[in-house]
Amino acid sequence: MRASKKPRHPSDVARRASESGGELLRLGLTIGAVGVAGAALGAVCPLCVVTTPALLGAGALQKLRSRFLARQQRLAEAEPTP
């Protein structure tokens, strides 16, 4: 038998998406800084070249998703109930 999951509150989903987006952005910036420092020393890290834009893009999408979810929640709370 499958355990039933508690329904997630929309604000929790938006908050978690924002937190994970921020974490991905910080990680992408950190790896990018390591890549730039390595390039300044004359060594190019192929992993840094690939992962930096991927992490920055994923983080930006998560941040946008969290804003969209928060906006949906605000609109749903503002609608009058019949």
Image (spheres, rainbow, N blue to C red):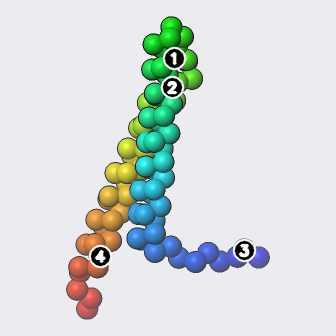
Q: Which residue is mark 1?
A: 38
Q: Which residue is mark 3?
A: 2
Assess disc 2: are there few (<14), some (14-19) or many (≥20) residues with their C-alpha within 10 Å of its C-alpha.
some
In primary-sequence order, the first of circles 2 and 4 is 2
Image depth: mark 2 or mark 3 in front? 2
Q: Amino acid at mark 2?
A: Val
Image depth: mark 2 or mark 4 in front? 2
Pointers 1 and 2 in contact (C-beta within 8 Å): yes
State the mark number for residue 76.
4
What's the CA distance linking mark 2 and mark 3? 45 Å
What's the CA distance linking mark 4 and mark 3? 30 Å
Q: Which residue is mark 2?
A: 34
In primary-sequence order, the first of circles 2 and 3 is 3
What's the CA distance linking mark 4 and mark 1? 49 Å
What's the CA distance linking mark 1 and mark 3? 50 Å
State the mark number for residue 64.
none
12 displayed left or right of 79: right
| Residue at horizontal 43 percent and vertical 63 percent from the top | 15
